[in-house]
Each structure stands twice: as C-alpha cells, then as structure tokens.
C-alpha cells in the first residue's frame, strides 16, 4: 500500500487500483486530499491498473470541499485538475459511496465513470446553504443525470436524496445492501465486470437527453423562480444556482462550466457566503461547552414527561414522539387534555411529510393523563405552564416529590430565574431551562439555561437531546429573557419610541423586513396578539398598546391591530386611524413629531440589540459571540446571509457602531444606550464580537 499524502492511500486488489481517502471527520476535500487524489490517479494509470475504485474510510464518502479552506491562500492541486484526471482516465473509474456524498464530494463522484453506493447513503449539493453554488462541475453534471426540475430543487434547497431515489434517477448505477466491506466488494466486482465486458468509459458531461428536455423552456425556469421567491428572499445563491442550471440546459457543457465558474467566484468572494460559512461553524461550535467535556456521562432518556398540553406543551411533546421517545402529557382536566392531543393529531395530519401510518405510530407514543404522579417513571419532565414564578415554584416542589432520583426537571420558561425555580426543589443540580420557541415542533432553536447548580451531566444531556430532536441547542446562563428575549426587548423599546417620534409602524416594519427579518416588531405583536399580558381592568392608557387594546384592537386574531387584516387573505394594510391614534397619544405625552429616516430606524432598532449582545457576552451569559448569532438566526429569523447580530456589527465595523451608540445615547435615555464596556474595548483594540469567547 502506498501512502500518497497524509489522507490518501493507493493499493491493489488484483489488477484493480483502490484509492482510499481517510480524512476525518467527514473526508472533506482538503488540499492534501486533492494532492493524494491527483497522485493516486496518475500512479494507478501509470502502474497499469485495469480499473480504479475510489472509496472513503470512516463514517462517510467525501462530504464536500473543506469549508475552512475558503478565503485562505490556495494550496495543492485544484479540484478541477483532479476531476479531469478521473474523467479522462483510460480505464474505468468506480466511485464507492457510503454515508453522504455532498457538494464537492458528489461532484467528484460525478466524474467517475460509474457509481456504486450503499442503500443507506445520501446525495446532495448543499452549497446553497453556504451561500454558494456547486463550483466543481456539479451544476452542469447533476441535471444531466437527474433532469432539470429535480436538479433545481436539490440545488436551491440543499436537500439530500436517498440511494433508492438516486438509483431511480440514474445518479448511481448500483445499490448495495450491507456494510463497508460489502460496498468495497461490490465496487471491485463492478470494476471486474466493467473490464470483462469492455463497458464504455461513461462521462456524465456527454449525456444530453435529460437537459435537452428543458432546452429553451423559459417558462419552466420562470415558474420555478416563482415557487422559491418567498423562501429565498434576500439570498443571492439560490438565483445563481438557477442560472447555472439554465446554462446546463441551454449551453454546451464547457460553456456551462464557465458560467458556473464565474458565478461561483462572485459568490465565494461575496459577503453573503462569508456570513453563511461563518454560520456553519458557529452552529457546530454552539454544542461545545468548555467546562462540560465531551465524555460527560448522559442521563438515559427513555421517557419524557410534559406538563401542559397547550400549544407549547403539545409542540414540545411532538419533538420526542418524532424520534420514537414515549411521552407522558399531563393536563389539569380531561377536556383540556383531549383538546391538546387533538391539536397534536391535526398538526401531524397536516404535515405532508408524515404518512397516515406515522401519524398513528407517533400518536401511540403519547400518553395523556390528568395526574402529575404519572411522571414518576419519566427521565425528563418539561413544564410548559403559565409564566408565573409562584406557579412554577409550586410545580417544581411537586415534581421534586414525584420524579425519580436522577430525573431531569426542566422549565420551558422564556425569561424567569431558573435558580429561583430550582430553589423550590431538594435537587437543584437536576433543574435546567429548556426554552423552546413557538411553534415548538417547527422552530429550530432550543435555548438551554444552566442554573448555578445544574450538573454537567444534566447540561450535556439537554444539549445532546437538542441535537437528537433536530434542534440547534445554545447554552445560556440565567438572566431575564436569557440570550434571545433579552436582546429582543431592547429592539421593542426603541421601536415603540420611534413611532412616538413620527415613524409609522409600517415604516419600522418595512425597514426591518427589507433588512431581511421575516417581520418587524409591530407585525410580530399583531401576530402574537396585542392583549397578551394586557388586562382591561388595569389598563390606564399609558402606552400605545394600551390605547389600541382599549379600542378593541387585538391584532391578527380579530383583524385589527397595528394594521387592519383582510379576513380572507390575512393581508395587512397600514391603518390611518391607528397612525392618528399614535400621533394624538404622542403629542399628549409631549413628543415632538418629525420625519424619521429609514437609516435612523435601522440603527435605533439594531444597535441596541448589538449592545445588549455584547453585555450578554461581558457577563458570561453566552459562551461566545457566535452563540448569540445562532440564537438570533434560528429563533428570530435574523437573515443568515448577514451572519447574526454580532457578525453583522463586525461587518459594519465596531468603531462605527460604538460611535453611533454614543451619539444616540446623548439624546435618548435608557440603559440600552449605555455602551457595553466589552464592545468599547474590542472597538479600540480591533477585536471582533463574533470571535469573542468567554
Ligand atoms: C463545496 O463542496 C464547494 C464545491 O462545490 C466547490 C469546490 C470548488 N468542511 O455537521 P457535523 C466538520 S462546499 C470542513 O457536526 P454530522 C464540522 O465542522 C461544501 N469541515 O456532523 C464538524 O467539526 P467539529 C459542501 C466540515 O454527522 C464535523 O465535521 N458540503 C465539513 O451531524 C462534523 O460535522 C457541505 O455543505 C466541510 N465540508 O453531519 C456539507 N463538513 O466536530 C457540510 C463537516 O470540529 N456538512 N465538517 O465541530 C454537513 O452537512 C454535515 O457535516 C454532514 C455530517 C452531513 C456531512
């Protein structure tokens, strides 16, 4: 066996050369892999091999280019040259695939003459999620095998497809059951057959029939663009991927490759991809807790308990049923329980990805009860009761009596003090916050809140469970509102003040929407319901919200809030009556009315958020700046192409942000304009918030 580079070896099985990549964890195409591949193909051909098998060691086939190399000085041979050596090899080249063949990995496999894959393997071009497009020929080769509509879908969504699908589409030539050895043997057998039968050296680039179907069909592309427009608003990469597929359909292969290369270059050097690549690693870093080692023993979670079958409790329960963990749901009375379980069933039935059989299977994992004593056999209990400290404490005191030793007791509170809640129990080490976002079965973020005494094992278990239920878990320490809502509160305060000074709710919302957020603060309040936490008996016309609620406006639910809503379409229209009510109220409070620029709206809404994020870091509430970004991207829809509030502030430039906060702080009151000492220090020293780590 010859070691070609630190990660690639070449050996022989009879006449067949076997090139093996071993570059853990995911066999990314680092420069030494490319080097090894280039040498491997050259040596195999020189050595007179009758065929060449390319296979990977470890958990997966190549999962793509090495993302950490983007933006660095190029080293080693280009991927393009390696691919040419493969495609033009004078003997059959067979890619043997297990795990995930993604991005550059699939693009390498597409340069083999044949592909053999395990039945568990998956295939995709997920570059779009990094603000990119497949830059190694994938945009031209994939449509030639799977057809234009499917290639468009895969490339603009980043979706993976399974082996059976891939076989059906002609993306692979043979599907194999079994383990890695079975794959290797099948690939060697395929190679022997290819030689014996003199099979052609099939090049994907020469295939034309599937792309020809879409040639000149402008309507197909226009229709596709319309279907993704809403989901991809603000992103460059999806449109660039579409343009490449258009080129695949309409241009000769080499010209299509040129289009791909030009658009790839534009994306890879642009700000969106830089933000999205940063975010890829940010999400993975969030799982690493410095004082909770990787090998911390976990609590074995066989059964979960959820207290409360309302929207939140039901949504939380669904997450566990989805991965086969049985759940005990407890409600106050049978009627509320039945209602809650009914909503869960409807949610499952409405989901297009859940079959009727799966609905029944998941529902059978949910056991309803009206007695908390039924939590006795649960390994984790999550309460989702009303946000009231006394109520939470009494619930935890009761759980303390019921739960078995070692069981985790979690609160879904969005802002209350976990330490105070834990003080109601005899085992604060078992108490933790698990803050799901609504709707809990859909939203990706899980804020995990460690109390002063929460044990390492409980923290590690909550974080690991988060990953298991396909959430992105971020760890926070205790403070009012934790990471996400604490930052949100600053924006809300300033948005409320902006409309008193002369901005309209519509203006504030539009500015934030155009920035890339899914909706602005007023549309968000209308959606949530203006009367949440508002009581007619105690309302005293002291805020705009008070006067809107007093005039019968409740938000979307009754068609009137900051906006008026069309009863059929739910479309919002700015309401002149509301604007007049706000003006009258503002004048009565002594606010001078003036025109507020969009730029001021943006700065006053976003800079206090950045400032608060920096304070959260300074206090050690979040472990790292990137964790704050992960919370805001996943929990509040911060546009990932701007990285998150910390990354965005760094891209604006901290000295500029600091100067503006000082400027606004001179004329506006509020703690949120008091400059974070950490941000001041970083701005002076040339540091960055998104790289800051406690
Ligand atoms: C591309 O290919 C461009 C080409 O078209 C053009 C070329 C010219 N690079 O996610 P995990 C690390 S763009 C470097 O927790 P899982 C990751 O950071 C690429 N590192 O595991 C983590 O490190 P750590 C297109 C990578 O089992 C560790 O591996 N490909 C890369 O949940 C484990 O990752 C993609 O976008 C990489 N490409 O999921 C695929 N990938 O342990 C991106 C992973 O230190 N990758 N790492 O935190 C994935 O989707 C998932 O990682 C995968 C495994 C499904 C493979």
Image (cartoon, rainbow, N blue to C red):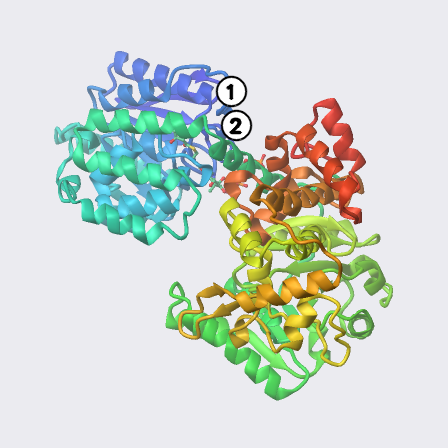
In the displayed structure, 688 sits above or below 314; it is above
Nearer-the-camera pick, 291 or 137: 137
Q: CA distance from mark 2 to mark 1?
A: 8 Å
> CB under 8 Å between callouts 2 and 1?
yes
Name above or below for residue 604 compared with residue 185: below
* Quadrant the C terminus occupies: top right
Q: Is mark 2 within 8 Å of ligand 1?
A: yes
Q: Is residue 652 above or below residue 407?
A: above
Looking at the picture, does residue 174 appear above or below residue 109? below
Q: Which x, y percent locates residue 567?
A: 44, 75
Percent from the top left, x then y, of residue 48?
Answer: 24, 15
Quick one: 690 or 110, which is closer to the camera? Answer: 690
The reply to whether residue 306 is visible in this rendering is no
User: Residue 208's x, y, as percent?
Assistant: 14, 36
Crowding near the residue tagged with mark 2, few <14, some 14–19, many ≥20 C-alpha atoms within 10 Å: few
**Residue at the disc numbered 1:** 72
For residue 417, what is the image quadrant?
bottom right
Percent coordinates x, y for residue 138 in the rendering: 30, 33
Residue sitting at x 70%, y 61%? 587
What residue occupies the far top of the structure in this picture? 46
Query: Which quadrant holds residue 60?
Result: top left
Left or right: residue 58 compared with residue 424: left
| Residue 68: image tag | 2
Please state if 107 lies on the left or on the right of 336 as rendered: left
Near mark 1 (Cα within 10 A), the count class, few <14, some 14-19 or many ≥20, is few
| Image quadrant where one finds the N terminus | top left
């Amino acid at each position: 066996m010859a070691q070609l580079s630190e990660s690639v070896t070449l050996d022989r099985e009879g006449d067949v050369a076997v090139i093996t990549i071993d570059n853990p964890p995911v066999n990314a195409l680092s420069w030494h892999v490319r080097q090894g591949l280039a040498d491997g193909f050259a040596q195999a051909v020189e050595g007179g091999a009758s065929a060449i098998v390319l296979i990977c060691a470890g958990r997966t086939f190549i999962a793509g280019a090495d993302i950490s190399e983007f933006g660095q000085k190029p080293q080693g041979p280009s991927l393009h040259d390696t691919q040419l050596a493969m495609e033009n090899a004078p003997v059959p080249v067979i890619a043997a695939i297990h795990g995930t063949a993604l991005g550059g990995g699939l693009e390498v496999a597409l340069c083999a003459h044949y592909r053999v894959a395990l039945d568990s393997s998956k295939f995709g071009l997920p570059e779009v999620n990094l603000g990119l497009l497949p830059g190694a020929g994938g945009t031209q080769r994939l449509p030639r095998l799977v057809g234009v509509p499917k290639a468009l879908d895969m490339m603009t969504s980043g979706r993976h497809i399974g082996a059976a699908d891939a076989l059906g589409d002609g993306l692979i030539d043979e599907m194999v059951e079994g383990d890695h050895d079975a794959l290797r043997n099948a690939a060697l057998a395929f190679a022997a057959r290819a030689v014996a039968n003199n099979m052609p050296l099939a090049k994907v680039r020469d295939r034309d029939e599937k792309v020809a179907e879409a040639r000149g069909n402008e309507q197909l592309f226009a229709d596709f663009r319309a279907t993704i427009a809403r989901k991809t608003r603000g992103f460059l990469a999806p449109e660039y991927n579409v343009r490449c597929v258009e080129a695949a359909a309409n241009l000769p292969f080499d010209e299509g490759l040129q289009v791909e290369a030009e658009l790839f270059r534009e994306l890879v050097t642009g700000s969106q991809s830089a933000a999205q690549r940063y975010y890829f690693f940010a999400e993975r870093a969030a799982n690493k807790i410095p004082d909770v080692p990787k090998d911390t023993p976990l609590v074995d979670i066989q059964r979960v308990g959820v207290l409360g079958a309302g929207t939140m409790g039901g949504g939380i329960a669904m997450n566990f049923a989805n991965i086969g963990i049985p759940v005990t749901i407890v409600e106050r009375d049978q009627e509320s329980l039945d209602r809650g379980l009914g909503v869960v069933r409807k949610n499952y039935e409405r989901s297009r990805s859940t079959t009727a059989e799966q609905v029944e299977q998941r529902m059978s994992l949910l056991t309803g009860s009206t007695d908390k004593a039924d939590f006795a056999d649960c390994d984790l209990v999550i309460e989702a009761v009303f946000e009231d400290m006394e109520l939470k404490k009494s619930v935890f005191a009761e759980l303390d009596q019921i739960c078995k030793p070692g069981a985790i007791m979690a609160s879904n509170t969005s802002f209350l003090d976990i330490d105070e809640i834990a003080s109601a129990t005899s085992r604060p080490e078992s108490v933790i916050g698990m803050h799901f976002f609504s709707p809990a079965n859909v939203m990706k973020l899980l804020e995990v809140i460690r109390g002063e005494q929460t044990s390492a094992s409980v923290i590690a278990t909550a974080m690991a469970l988060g990953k298991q239920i396909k959430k992105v878990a971020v760890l926070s320490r205790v403070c009012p509102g934790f990471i996400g809502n604490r930052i949100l509160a600053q924006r809300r305060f300033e948005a409320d003040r902006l409309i008193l000074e002369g901005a309209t709710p519509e203006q504030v919302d539009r500015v934030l929407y155009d920035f890339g957020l899914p909706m602005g603060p007023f549309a968000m309040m209308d959606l949530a319901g203006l009367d949440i936490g508002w009581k007619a008996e105690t309302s005293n016309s002291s805020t705009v919200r008070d006067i809107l609620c007093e005039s019968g406006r409740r938000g979307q639910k009754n068609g009137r809030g900051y906006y008026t809503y069309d009863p059929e379409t739910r479309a919002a229209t700015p309401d002149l009556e509301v604007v007049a009510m706000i003006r009258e109220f503002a004048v009565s409070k002594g606010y001078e009315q003036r025109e507020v620029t969009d730029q001021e709206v943006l700065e006053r809404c976003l800079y206090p958020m950045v400032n608060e994020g920096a304070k959260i870091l300074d206090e050690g509430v979040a472990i790292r700046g990137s964790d704050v970004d992960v919370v805001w991207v996943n929990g509040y829809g911060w546009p990932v192409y701007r990285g998150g509030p910390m990354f965005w502030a760094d891209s604006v430039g901290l000295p500029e942000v600091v100067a503006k906060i000082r400027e606004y702080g001179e004329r506006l009151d509020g703690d949120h304009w008091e400059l974070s000492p950490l941000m001041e220090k970083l701005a002076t020293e040339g540091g960055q918030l998104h790289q800051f780590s406690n």
